[in-house]
Image (tube, grey):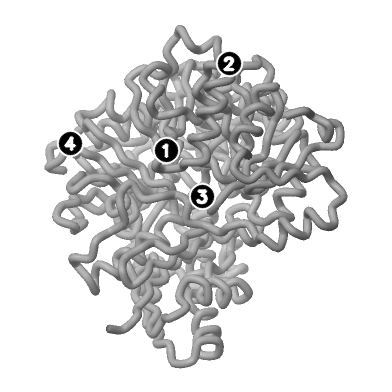
Amino acid sequence: MTQRYYLGLCVTYHDPALAIVGPDGAVLYAEATERPLQYKRALNCEPDNLYLLPRLLRRYCPDAEELVVAFNWRRQRPLYERLMGLLGYFSARGLLRPDFKRLLAFMDTPSLHHMLACNGNALRRAGVNLARVVPRAFPGVKLSFRHYDHHLCHAAMACYGSPYPEAGCLVVDSYGENGSMGWYRYQGGRVRPLYLSRGVESHGFFYMKLTELCGFDWMAGEEWKVMGLAPYGQLDEDIYRLLDGMVRREGLKLQHVRAGFFAALERLENYRRAADAPPLAAANLAHTGQRFFADVLSEGLGHFHSLAGSANLALGGGCALNSSYNGRILERTPFQSLYVPPAPADDGTALGAAWLALRDDKPDAPLPMAPVSPYLGSTLSEDGIANLARHSGLSLRHLPGSIAVTVAQILAQGRIVGWIQGRAEFGPRALGNRSLLADPRPADMAERLNAVVKYRESYRPFAPSILHEHGPDWFEHYQESPYMERTLRFKPEVRQRVPAVVHVDGTGRLQTVKREWNPLLHELLSHFHGLTGVPLLLNTSYNVMGKPMAHSVEDALAVFLTAGVDALALGDYLLLKPELADLSL
């Protein structure tokens, strides 16, 4: 039997990624390109990097006889895209032309054209590096190429990675081939579309516009800032009425109200935060926009429930990163169970495309034990750690078998620890392998982290990682959240015990930790619980603002030396700042 491996490529101009699935269906590797490049979102970069590709193939596909390369977009582009390209609107000069037709969208047409131009360039480069590397480095290995619908790739990631035998699936983002939403039914191992939107009506475009009006940069992925800011504000009835008059939903269909749309859009500009105003000046705008986003999506999901044929909901697309809304879906809609994958945005379509190719060849092939593990990325170089021990001159302790015990003691003393273990997470959130960890009990811990480690705005919240067995004692209407993808409300009686991870509205974006999902993190939390009586830790990504999570030993050391991190756990090795070198543990 031919040893056939499946390479999924997310070739979107932002957040490119590569995934590798083995002949038996096992997910061997999945990682966003931003990590090895250390370039946030890896804008306009290819996923099949010429330098990295040979090493990945040698490691994960050593006996390959055939590589099936699966792309996350259809080969045939939509008519509008082809026409605008032929007319030159996607060239540098064309993007500056003033004679374009204004599209009925929340985003301005030049920005939309720029995104389409960048995406078109990414698609034209797709697989070119593979075509160069494979014949030279792996002679005799056959290459074949397949293309899949973008939203179907999102749906495959959400459905095939879920614990459900059947579910309704919603994909919602800025845009796909023809629209921004796909509504699917998942049953019997098949993902079947029920309704696919067409046109520029888009929850994603709306949230990008909201991000811009609040004074942030959606190109840099700063929608997070809007979600963090929203709880500080109140509902502005005038803004809500303005938005409500611009959008109409009919069943699963989202429509923009043509009459008065552009006039209303101009009125929205009056609420834009001034460049010299503090972020909190946009709190009411962020709150109202988040409320409107949640209301419109809830209305659609309420209608979808009767069509989905299931009480289970799988959610995909970039808008599925809205953890504030995700935590309220089960209380606001008839669905009874929710699954959001670790990489619901475009990076996850790399794995979705690879899974679709596998299912085409092997319709009955078993998928990985669900929910899919997020720990699919790179590991630390052992040579890098050895070189650090040999040449750094820093205090480095080797603690095989006791690293969790020692780190728990350091955390209980109020120290901040970098925690770099095992394989990196696939997706944008730190799930306990590329994390900054801290004691959630000190009232000033969040402020300290924002000021001297993350170098970001003071209102930005931090997330709790909690032992699953204690979740119901700490959260109202507790739900498992393995990928930190939903926000739940802390019980009032425990909020004062962990102020560093309780947001201003009493919520926290939790990560459920089970022993079978992450044994070492579970061990660390258990030891911390034994020392403090608190079964959770503050967990945020190991990076500084504007940079991806650390990828290599060198990246980890750079953050450690240039930020207020007290200790760094690299596998079984513990690195301490000089002032703590004599710490008794």
Helix, strand or loop status at disc 2: helix
| 309 sits left or right of 232 in the view | left
Question: Which residue corresponds to the image point at 61% horizontal and 28% vertical from the top-left?
Answer: 460
Q: Distance between the residues labelled 4 and 1?
A: 28 Å
> In the picture, residue 151 is in which quadrant?
bottom left
Q: Is mark 4 on a helix, strand or loop?
A: loop
Q: Distance between the residues labelled 4 and 2?
A: 35 Å
Amino acid type of the residue tagged 1 in the rendering: Arg
- Of pointers 3 and 1, the one earlier in the residue sequence: 3
Q: Mark 1 points at which residue?
A: 515
Alpha carbon distance from label 3 to label 1: 17 Å
Q: What amino acid does circle 2 point to? A: Pro
How many angstroms separate mark 1 from mark 2 (CA)? 26 Å
Mark 3 vs mark 1: in front: 1
**Residue drawn where x is 36% and y is 74% of the image:** 75
Please tell me which residue lies in front, 410 or 196.
410
Where residue 301 sits: x, y (%)?
24, 36
Where is residue 102? Give x, y as percent.
45, 53
The residue that label 3 is drawn on is: 425
**Quadrant of the image occupied by residue 387:** bottom right
Q: In this view, does 26 lie above or below 487?
A: below
Q: Which of marks 1 and 2 is nearer the N terminus?
A: 2
Residue identifier under label 4 = 311
Seen at 35% across and 80% down, the residue is: 3
Amino acid under disc 4:
Ala
Badge number at residue 499:
2
Amino acid found under the numbered disc labelled 3: Glu
